[in-house]
Amino acid sequence: MNTLRQHIESIIFTSSSPISRDEILNCINSFFGTNFDIDVIQTLIDEIKVVFDAPEFSFKLIEIDNGYQFYTKAQHNDLLNYFLKQQHRKKLSTASLETLAIIAYKQPISKVDIEAIRGVNCDYAVQKLLEKELVSISGRAETVGKPLLYKTSEKFMSYFGLKNIQDLPKPKELELTENSIGLEENLNS
């Protein structure tokens, strides 16, 4: 019965939404070729609730929407909210990824040149990349106004698992020629 309880725990833990005791029963009986009764499943679910109510566990089993799901206990909410905010900050927007790709392939490059390639203002994207320490300022250009130049950082290398900048994938060169798509038509027919 202890092993059966562990199987039930793992099913509930794995489910992304509340799972009913009937779904648990059907899964167990189908997978193991057994014929357990719903009362056995309910008894084990009740045991799991008691076990996870103990203070040494950070999770508890909740009955919700005619099913069961593990939830973290309320005393961990502040920490988990902080953690999720930190994780969210690690993600890069499409604009930031495009800007980062331009910097990686064209470094050192000025913001004006990045904007010329992207066709839009990139102040916010560059600022976010600097905050995340994925790019750094490498100096100033010897052009009018002496704009700042940006390059990738060491953190960029580890973030993308690169040993050096030469490990970046090579952009494919596209050469379009006249009539390169489809068959050439015979216009004299």
Image (spheres, rainbow, N blue to C red):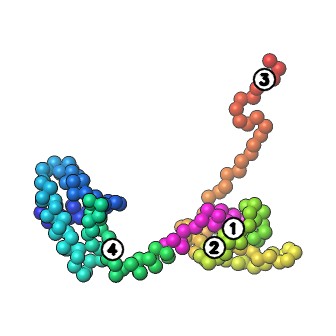
The residue to which callout 3 is attached is 186
- Disc 3 or 2, which lies upstream in sequence? 2
Image spot of residue 10 (x, y percent): 26, 63
Q: Dots 2 and 1: beta carbons under 8 Å? A: yes
Amino acid type, mark 1: Ile
Which secondary structure lies at badge 2?
A: helix
Whether residue 83 is situated above or below residue 13 in the rendered picture: below
Quadrant where the N terminus sits is bottom left
The answer to whether one can see residue 3 in this image is: no
The residue to which callout 1 is attached is 103
- Disc 3 or 4, which lies upstream in sequence? 4
Quadrant hosting residue 181: top right
Amino acid type, mark 4: Thr
Quadrant hosting residue 160: bottom right
Quadrant where the C terminus sits is top right
Q: Is residue 102 magenta?
A: yes
- Disc 2 or 4, which lies upstream in sequence? 4
Image spot of residue 81 (x, y percent): 44, 77
Whole-number angstrom distance, CA of label 4 to CA of label 1: 41 Å
Which callout, 3 or 2, points to the residue nearer the camera?
2
The residue to which callout 2 is attached is 129
> Depth check: 177 or 14 in front?
14
Residue at the image point whose x is 59% and y is 71% from the top: 156
Whole-number angstrom distance, CA of label 2 to CA of label 4: 33 Å
Whole-number angstrom distance, CA of label 2 to CA of label 1: 10 Å
Which secondary structure lies at badge 3?
A: loop
Few, some or many residues within 10 Å of mark 4 (<14, 14–19, 20+): some
